Amino acid sequence: MPKRNLHIVNPNNPLFGICERCNARFTSFAYNSDEATRQVQAAFDDHKCHSSSGGQNDLASKPTK
């Protein structure tokens, strides 16, 4: 199981990052890069991972309504 870690994909505006464990996405459109970093880090810290194993197949195997 991968460690829960924030990976910054795009450091420019908009700042964009993903959770390496569950692939959740976090974006900030703040003009100030320090503020954008704080917003994305706070959103990452507050989120709960979707998948217990972190695999992409877990999402595909869930039934749709």
Image (cartoon, rainbow, N blue to C red):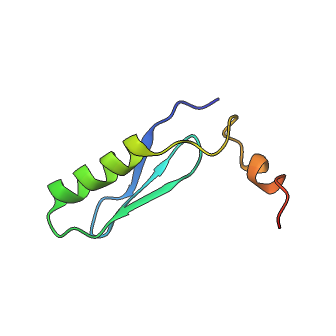
Where 38 sits versus 32, above or below?
above
Could you tell whether 9 is left or right of 54 in the image? left
Could you tell whether 50 is left or right of 7 in the image? right
Q: Nearer the viewer, residue 51 or 15?
A: 51
Q: Residue at x 53, y 30 (%)?
A: 3
Quadrant location of the N terminus? top right
Residue 23 spot, x, y in % from top left: 57, 51
Where 24 sits versus 30, above or below?
above
Q: Nearer the viewer, residue 16 or 24?
A: 24
Could you tell whether 22 is left or right of 18 in the image? right
Q: Residue at x 37, y 50 (%)?
A: 43
Residue 58 spot, x, y in % from top left: 77, 46
Q: Using the rendered view, name the quadrant where residue 46 is placed.
A: top left
Where 41 sits versus 26, above or below?
above
Q: Residue at x 78, y 49 (%)?
A: 57
Q: Residue at x 17, y 70 (%)?
A: 31
Residue 55 spot, x, y in % from top left: 71, 42
Residue 48 spot, x, y in % from top left: 52, 42
Quadrant location of the C terminus? bottom right
Total marks in image = 0
Q: Quick one: which residue is furthest to the front in this view?
A: 65
Q: Using the rendered view, name the quadrant where residue 28 is placed.
A: bottom left
